[in-house]
Image: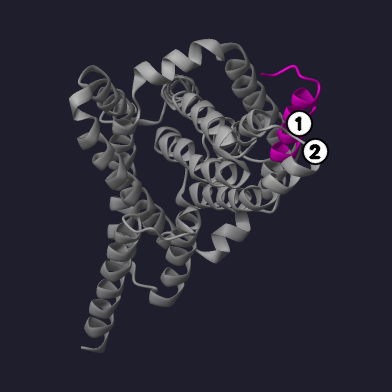
Amino acid sequence: MTNTIKTNVSWVTMLVIISLLIGVNYTNFQYKAFVPGCALNLGIVLAEIHRDASIRHYTKVWSTRILGYAIILLGFGFNLNNILKVGIVGIGYTLISIGGTLILGITIGRLLGNRGKISTLISSGTAICGGSAIAAISPIIHSSHEETAVAMGTVFLLNAVGLLIFPVIGHWLGLSGQQFGLLAALAIHDTSSVVGSCMAYGHNSLIVGTTVKLVRALWIIPLSLIIAVIYAKINHGNTQNGRIKKPWFILWFILASLIVTLFPALNIMGASLKHFGESLFMVALFLIGYNVSFANLKAVGIKVLFQAVSLWVIISIIVILVLKANLLH
């Protein structure tokens, strides 16, 4: 009887937290950019308190599903016409920066001896748009909950640091609004943190930073498909019902983007669906965290954090040097 009461209380606690995570995205909470990281850590802590195998089973099943639904709904926030129009102008440095970051990140990971999957998650998250890129790629490469949680947690930590220190660095270096917008878009992981830091710097930097970051975020689509092909060839045994598991949610993401692009009248509805997708994303992070133990996190190792920080610092320095040399406009 006691165990039944404990389980029921645990379920109620879970539902309350999930409701709060969905609701907070519809408020004007000032520190909303920190909520995803808090959701992930809250899941980890709560799992240690509950230690309930049945809840852990259901959260493990639904975390991947909800993450896929969240990515699909986020697609309704991408108008391909606007993003591609801007992307044509900056297609050169966008390709170079994304490709260079991926190569550098994977190289650092190999030098440190980090496993391929988590190294891929860290590199992809740094190259494109942080948590969203990791969320899209983790089910494709079948990364463990621990690997996904560590990659997410590391990115959210660096997001928080970047949100606070980048405006200070920008003023210290005397960067213009346009230059800082480029720095934020190319060096800060998540779009929310880019927006936050650019808002603190000025209106011009906000326009430039948001636009460039949206262009980079669009590369989730080709990168996910490329990684799916690569991992399918590497892991021939990773099949399901005799067939390689394909990232169908990415195709639905593309369809969602096409709908709001081809039918502008649906943009308001698309914005609402994207907003709900952001809420589901936070719920998925909470459920992922619930399937992670402190022991397994420790087993992943400090080298992953070192890889992420090293890659982030190197990319930031390169972007600053390029901006100060007026090679990037």
Tell me if I can see residue 113 in this picture.
no
Looking at the image, which residue sits at the far front? 203
Q: Which residue is mark 2?
A: 173
| Up-down relation of residue 37 to residue 323 (above or below) | below
Residue at 59% x, 45% y: name it. Answer: 197
| Up-down relation of residue 180 to residue 296 (above or below) | above
Residue at 62% x, 36% y: name it. Answer: 184
| Up-down relation of residue 60 to residue 215 (above or below) | below
Q: Secondary structure at mark 1?
A: helix
Q: Which residues are magenta?
A: 311-329
Residue 222 point in image, percent of width and height = 44, 19
Tell me if I can see residue 155 in this picture.
yes
Disc 2 residue type (three-letter): Leu
Disc 1 residue type (three-letter): Ile
In the image, taking residue 276 as reference, residue 118 lies left or right, namely: right
Image label count? 2
Circle 1 Cα neighbour tier, 10 Å, few/some/many (<14 / 14–19 / ≥20)? many
Residue 30 point in image, percent of width and height = 47, 59
Residue at 65% x, 53% y: name it. Answer: 164
- Mark closer to the chain start, 2 or 1: 2
Q: Is residue 314 magenta?
A: yes
Disc ID at residue 320: 1
Question: Is most of the magenta stretch helix, strand or loop?
Answer: helix
In the image, taking residue 4 as reference, residue 126 lies left or right, namely: right
Residue at 76% x, 19% y: name it. Answer: 326
In the image, taking residue 312 as reference, residue 36 lies left or right, namely: left
- What's the distance in space between the residues labelled 2 and 1, CA to CA? 9 Å
Q: Secondary structure at mark 2?
A: helix
Its colouring scheme is: one colour
